[in-house]
Every structure is written in C-alpha cells, then in structure tokens.
Image: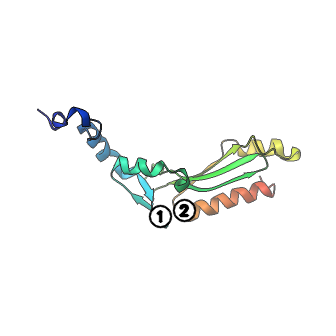
C-alpha cells in the first residue's frame, strides 16, 4: 500500500499525489509571487502560486489604452529567462483595442510596429519604465 492509498476517498482531491510532489520539486524553482513591495519571491508550492494568480490586479503592473492599442504590462510568475541568470518575470505586450480607435494617419504604422511586440524584464521597476517607454513611443509617433 502506498502513501497515496492512505487518503480517504472523500478527501482524495485535497492531498498531493506522488506525481504532484515530483512535479512541484522539478519545477518549483520557476514559480514566483509578488510581495507587498512588488518584489518577486520564489514559492515551492503550486497551490500557493495559483492562489496568488487568482487576483489579476496583483499581477498587473500597468495597462494603457492609446491610439487603438492596449499596452499591457504584467507579472508572469514564471521565469522566462531560459538561459539562466536573473529571472525574467515581467512582460509588456501590445494588443489591438477595439474600444479605442486609432488616429487615421497612424493606423497602418501603429499596427505594423505593434504587431508581435513583446518585451520582458527582471524587476517591477524595469517593467514600469518599459511600459512608460512604449506608451510614450506610441503617443509621440516614434514607432
């Protein structure tokens, strides 16, 4: 009889399985949450990480609608720095904003520049500065 067999039938979903424990051990170094100062903190428990991600506002660094685009900068919670070094945990992306029409003169230029735009950062402060840079670039037509 294994440790998984000891779980009462009614509570089977509450207890982690051996597979869950192996998964958590293998990938836990990649999970992060933010503390009250917006500093990333590694977590080793998938449930703790997922509870943090239930709150979209806690993950949002900034969002701006401008010239038909929606600039979104968020905390990713997973290290996207695949080559090692400082974890890359924040990202700015640009999406078309159907509720905010672009100025006619810039439409094609904006759409071409913003298509597939993505920038990633290691810290909250870098992400804030990156978001502001993108918004300024769009606002001033520097794309």
**Residues packed near mark 2 inside 10 Å, few (<14), some (14 to 19) or many (20 plus):** many
**Residues packed near mark 1 inside 10 Å, few (<14), some (14 to 19) or many (20 plus):** few
Q: CA distance from mark 2 to mark 1?
A: 7 Å
Position in image of residue 34 (x %, y %): 46, 59
Position in image of residue 113 (x %, y %): 74, 46
Please identify the quarter of the rendering in which residue 32 is found. Answer: bottom left
Which disc is residue 124 wearing? Answer: 2
Tag 2 and tag 1, C-beta contact below 8 Å: yes
Which disc is residue 118 wearing? Answer: none
Observer-nearest residue: 112 or 63? 63
Residue extending farthest left? 1
> Residue at the spot x=33%, y=52% of the render?
44
Q: How is the model colour-coded? A: rainbow
Residue 132 lies left or right of residue 37; in this view the side is right
> Residue at the spot x=63%, y=59% of the render?
130
Position in image of residue 21 (x %, y %): 26, 43
Residue 57 position (above or below residue 24) = below
Position in image of residue 50 (x %, y %): 42, 47
Residue extending farthest right? 105
Sooner in the amino-acid sequence: mark 2 or mark 1: 1
Residue pointed to by mark 1: 39
């Amino acid at each position: 009889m294994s440790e998984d067999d000891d779980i009462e039938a009614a509570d089977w979903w509450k207890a982690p399985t051996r597979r869950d424990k192996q998964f958590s051990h293998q990938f836990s170094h990649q999970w992060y949450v933010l503390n009250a100062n917006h500093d990333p903190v590694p977590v080793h428990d998938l449930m703790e990480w997922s509870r943090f991600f239930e709150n979209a506002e806690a993950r949002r660094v900034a969002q701006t609608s401008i010239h038909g685009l929606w600039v979104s900068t968020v905390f990713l919670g997973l290290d996207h720095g695949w080559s090692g070094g400082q974890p890359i945990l924040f990202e700015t992306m640009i999406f078309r904003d159907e509720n905010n029409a672009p100025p006619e003169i810039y439409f094609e230029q904006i759409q071409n520049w913003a298509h597939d735009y993505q920038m990633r950062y290691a810290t909250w402060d870098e992400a804030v500065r990156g978001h502001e840079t993108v918004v300024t670039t769009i606002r001033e037509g520097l794309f």
